[in-house]
Image (tube, rainbow, N blue to C red):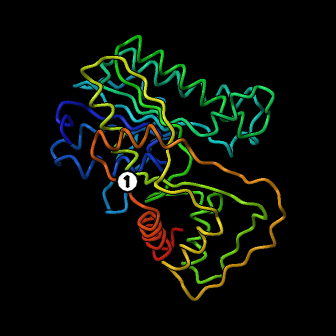
């Protein structure tokens, strides 16, 4: 990608879904001579194996403030205590854990030139706007809003672009927590030749965006904004179509295992659970950068390819 030869790369939260997908994306874009310019961080030091067999040395997050890059850094910041961790901590501890992660990045930013920052927010930020909502999702969303505001201010202070998409539903390689995500759960049933069980008794509507498309789009936004100084891009992710989870099960069945049955309890008449972003801004960005996002069927196949490889290796 044009501009990649002028920057270093810092991937924080490298062992997670977006982190691993970003490392794979960068190593495919960069010549081997530039791979040492990629600096990866996670909660603890480790060697991370990507699906092509590449070994990545990951440093502990505690060492991030000491890093000095030789060129301005494009920063991909994914480290965050996710929604499923809210109940595992007191509210105060949960907030402090996320604040400590943010502070580590702030110390790095204070000491280095920054070319751009990609820090995903979440569709849960909208629930977080309601201060009376004390659900795990809303608490998680309020912490994401805190990050949005803090990093927007940081970008303004130092004059670099910040890209903070509110992520709703994504697909693709390195998907994790297969039991928590509808798409992964359905695909897992197909791959294991088990009946596809849809538990929801009310309409559940989702829209999927490819993780690789998201990374490319945000890279282009950061690089395009380098000459413009501070800019804050907050927008929703949304795929090319919205789909009810029952139809999602049918699409996966048709593509992966047409012989399987789909089981679903009778619908209760409860209001629909719609978790779909506003597509207007992301469509404009795609047109500007001539990005054609993957359709749902392509996303299902690529996600299934990754999960099947895990299954065959015994790592799923």
Residue positioned 35% across, 26% down in the render? 67
Measured along the vertical axis of the image, is residue 256 above or below residue 49? below
Q: Position of residue 275 (x, y in %)?
A: 63, 48
Residue at label 1? 293
Residue 108: horizontal and vertical position, in percent? Answer: 40, 21
Query: What residue is rendered at 41% in x and 26% in y?
Result: 162
Q: Is residue 85 above or below residue 194?
A: above
Does dot 1 land on a helix, a strand or a loop?
loop
The residue nearer to you, when weighing 147 against 228, is 228
Image quarter where the N terminus lies is top left
User: In front here: 50 or 206?
Assistant: 206
Q: Is residue 161 above or below residue 179?
A: above
Left or right position of 15 against 92: left
Residue visible at 66% across and 29% down?
142
Quarter where residue 118 is shown: top left
Q: Position of residue 148 (x, y in %)?
A: 53, 25
């Amino acid at each position: 990608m044009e501009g990649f030869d002028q920057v270093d790369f810092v991937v924080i939260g490298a062992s997670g879904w977006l982190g691993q997908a970003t490392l794979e994306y960068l190593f495919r874009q960069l010549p081997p001579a530039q791979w040492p310019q990629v600096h990866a961080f996670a909660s603890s030091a480790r060697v991370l194996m990507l699906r092509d067999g590449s070994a990545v040395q990951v440093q502990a997050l505690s060492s991030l403030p000491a890093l000095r890059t030789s060129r301005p850094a494009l920063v991909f910041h994914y480290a965050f205590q996710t929604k499923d961790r809210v109940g595992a901590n007191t509210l105060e501890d949960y907030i402090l854990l996320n604040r400590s992660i943010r502070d580590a990045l702030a110390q790095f930013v204070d000491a280095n030139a920054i070319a751009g920052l990609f820090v995903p927010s979440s569709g849960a930020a909208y629930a977080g706007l309601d201060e009376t909502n004390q659900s795990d999702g809303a608490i998680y969303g309020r912490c994401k809003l805190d990050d949005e505001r803090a990093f927007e201010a940081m970008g303004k202070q130092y004059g670099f672009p910040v890209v903070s998409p509110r992520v709703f539903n994504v697909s693709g390689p390195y998907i994790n927590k297969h039991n928590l995500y509808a798409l992964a759960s359905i695909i897992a049933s197909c791959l294991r030749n088990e009946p596809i069980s849809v538990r929801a008794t009310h309409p559940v509507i989702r829209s999927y965006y490819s993780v690789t498309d998201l990374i490319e789009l945000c890279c282009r936004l950061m690089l395009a904004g380098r000459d413009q100084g501070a800019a804050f891009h907050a927008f929703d992710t949304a795929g090319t179509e919205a789909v009810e989870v029952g139809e999602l099960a049918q699409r996966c069945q048709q593509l992966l295992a047409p012989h399987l049955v789909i089981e679903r309890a009778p619908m209760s008449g409860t209001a629909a659970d719609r978790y779909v972003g506003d597509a207007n801004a992301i469509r404009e960005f795609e047109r500007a950068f001539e990005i054609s996002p993957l359709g749902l069927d392509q996303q299902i196949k690529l996600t299934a390819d990754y999960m099947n490889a895990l299954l065959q290796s015994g790592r799923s």
